[in-house]
């Protein structure tokens, strides 16, 4: 049978209903350790079987502490993949009123969630009436995507921006330049893979070029040559 058959639709509906219940059972706290461990505890069904997270635990935890202390009201993430960090930002920031995902379908660096996964990601804040989740499926570097984000923001500005999309030097540079203009004066900008030295990855190069212009922190596992999170403070004080 094809993917759009009645059988497949019923099967997916059942898997989603069961997974939604499993997800609800782990949405118990905004404590960072509890949230990070809940990703492992969650066991869904079918297409919604896991929340996947490509991060080193301590690197992400240290970044989360800074973000949570900042209490961002508006969060934007470039590059959501299978929703791991999007889930984390949603859960550790109960005060957030807007959390926005920008992700390129079939992107080279893990992008591509489809409409079906959006309904699952939307459940990440199902217990919080004050938090609105938005999903923009497009190229973060395009003018049309920037305009879509502006429409979602309205009069708001971004308090925390996490960049984990196009990992080329040109891509990360374009994302930073495009979206830093939409940020609050005291905003935070996070970068993933500042310590990844593989072909096609230029985040480390761009990070090392700009970090000296700001107050910044690096969260890198000792001895590692992969991943790593960087954080820029737009306001020096």
Image (cartoon, helix red, strand yellow):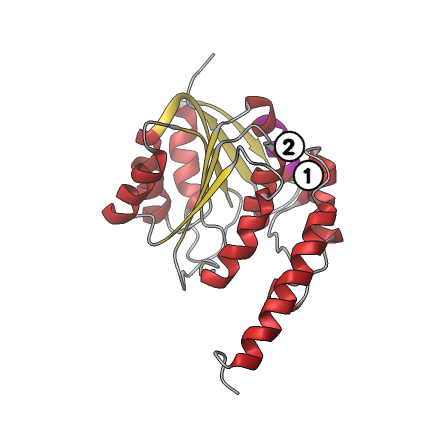
| Residue 143 image point, x, y percent | 24, 46
Q: Residue furthest bottom?
A: 1
- On whether residue 22 falls in the magenta region, the answer is no
Q: Which residue is mark 2?
A: 62
Q: Residue furthest left?
A: 143
Q: Residues within 10 Å of mark 2 (few under 14, many from 20)?
A: some
| Residue 100 image point, x, y percent | 44, 42
Q: Is residue 108 left or right of residue 141?
A: right
Q: Secondary structure at mark 2?
A: helix
| Residue 103 image point, x, y percent | 41, 52
The number of numbered badges drawn on the structure is: 2
Residue 37, above or below 218? below
Nearest the eye: 175 or 1: 1
Is any atom of residue 226 visible in this view?
Answer: no
| Residue 44 image point, x, y percent | 69, 61
Q: Residue at x 72, y 55 (%)?
A: 22
Badges 2 and 1: C-beta atoms under 8 Å apart? yes
- On whether residue 62 falls in the magenta region, the answer is yes
Q: Residue at x 63, y 46 (%)?
A: 224
Residue 158, quarter of the rendered image: top left
Task: Tell me the distance, in whole angstroms, between the alpha carbons under discs 2 and 1.
Answer: 6 Å
Q: Which residue is mark 1?
A: 58
* Range shown magenta: 61-66
Residue 49, above or below 123? below
Is any atom of residue 171 visible in this view?
Answer: yes
Q: Is residue 109 left or right of residue 38?
A: left
Overall secondary structure of the magenta section: helix
Q: Residue at x 29, y 42 (%)?
A: 146
Q: Is residue 181 left or right of residue 206?
A: left
Q: Residue at x 45, y 58 (%)?
A: 111
Nearest the eye: 213 or 98: 98
């Amino acid at each position: 049978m094809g993917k759009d058959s009645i059988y497949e639709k019923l099967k997916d509906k059942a898997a989603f209903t069961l997974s939604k219940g499993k997800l609800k059972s782990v949405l118990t706290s905004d404590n960072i350790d509890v949230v990070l461990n809940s990703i492992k505890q969650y066991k869904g069904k079918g297409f919604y079987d896991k929340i996947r997270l490509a991060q080193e635990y301590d690197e992400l935890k240290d970044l989360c502490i800074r973000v949570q202390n900042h209490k961002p009201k508006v969060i934007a993430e470039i590059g959501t993949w299978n929703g791991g960090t999007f889930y984390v930002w949603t859960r550790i920031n109960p005060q957030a009123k807007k959390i926005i995902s920008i992700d390129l379908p079939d992107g080279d660096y893990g992008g591509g969630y489809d409409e079906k996964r959006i309904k699952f990601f939307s459940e990440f804040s199902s217990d919080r009436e004050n938090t609105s989740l938005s999903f923009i499926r497009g190229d973060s570097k395009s003018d049309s995507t920037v305009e879509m984000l502006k429409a979602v923001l309205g009069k708001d500005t971004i308090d925390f921006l996490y960049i984990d999309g196009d990992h080329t030097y040109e891509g990360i540079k374009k994302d930073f330049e495009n979206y830093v203009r939409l940020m609050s004066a005291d905003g935070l900008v996070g970068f993933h893979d500042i310590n990844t030295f593989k072909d096609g990855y230029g985040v480390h190069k761009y990070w090392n070029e700009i970090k000296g212009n700001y107050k910044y922190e690096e969260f890198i596992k000792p001895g590692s040559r992969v991943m790593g999170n960087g954080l820029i403070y737009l306001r020096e004080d």
